[in-house]
Amino acid sequence: MDKGNWGLFAIFAAVLWSVALIALPGLLLVLAAAGKRLAGLQSRTLDLLRSSTGALVPMGLMVWVAFVVPMLMVNVTFVTQSFSDPFGWGWDFFGVASTPWHQLWPCSIPFIQVACILVGVAYSLRNAWRIWLDHAPSPDRALRGVLPLALLLLGISGGLVWFFSN
């Protein structure tokens, strides 16, 4: 990398880390404060923020799975060939070492990705609901409190469904 590209790389890294460490947690803090206000709770906003982050885990995991699905489907032939000839010494344990390369169900990849996103958002919404139900004295106040986070999760999942299915 020449010296001119290092400056661009540094700017890109600074923007990326700023978003990851400042903007996203700030957005989540604003959503927790909005949920607290809508639900009329007396809890500390930081406690609500810390609790609410558990709702992001299923979505994050399933987004990662959706991202990996195309690589798995494209390379599945190589995986089976590697099991049949693990060291590349000409062995053929399962009779598939010389099979030609092919993708596994290439037309189904966007459907699998969208299904992963939908499962992730469903579990994230379920977790968010349970978290806010623990903090709120009644289900209707919990529903008002979870609404900002739920809208964010639905918006992100809608964008990801559009991205993967487009």
Image (spheres, rainbow, N blue to C red):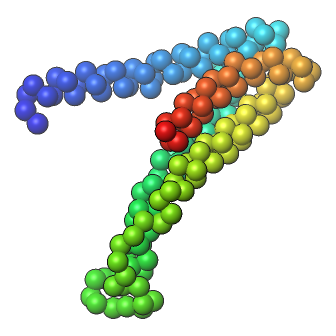
In the rendered image, the vertical position of residue 87 relative to residue 77, given as above or below: below
Q: In screen coordinates, is 45 left or right of 96?
A: right
Of residues 79 and 73, the one nearer the viewer is 73
Q: Position of residue 58 (x, y in %)?
A: 64, 42
Q: Quadrant of residue 53?
A: top right
Residue 162 appears in the rendering: yes
The residue shown at (31%, 22%) is: 14
Q: Identify the residue at horizontal 31%, vertical 82% (top origin).
A: 87
Q: Quadrant of the N terminus?
A: top left
**Viewer-nearest residue: 86 or 18:** 86
Q: Where is 66 relative to 3, above or below?
A: below
At 60% from the left and 31% from the top, the residue drawn is: 158
Image side of residue 18 versus residue 31, left or right: left
The percent position of residue 148, horizontal first and vertical second, equals 69, 18
Q: Is there any visible trace of residue 42 in the rendered image? A: no
- Where does residue 12 sit, x and y in percent of width and height? 28, 25
Q: What residue sits 28% from the left and 90% below the top?
A: 90
Give the x, y percent position of residue 54.
Answer: 66, 35
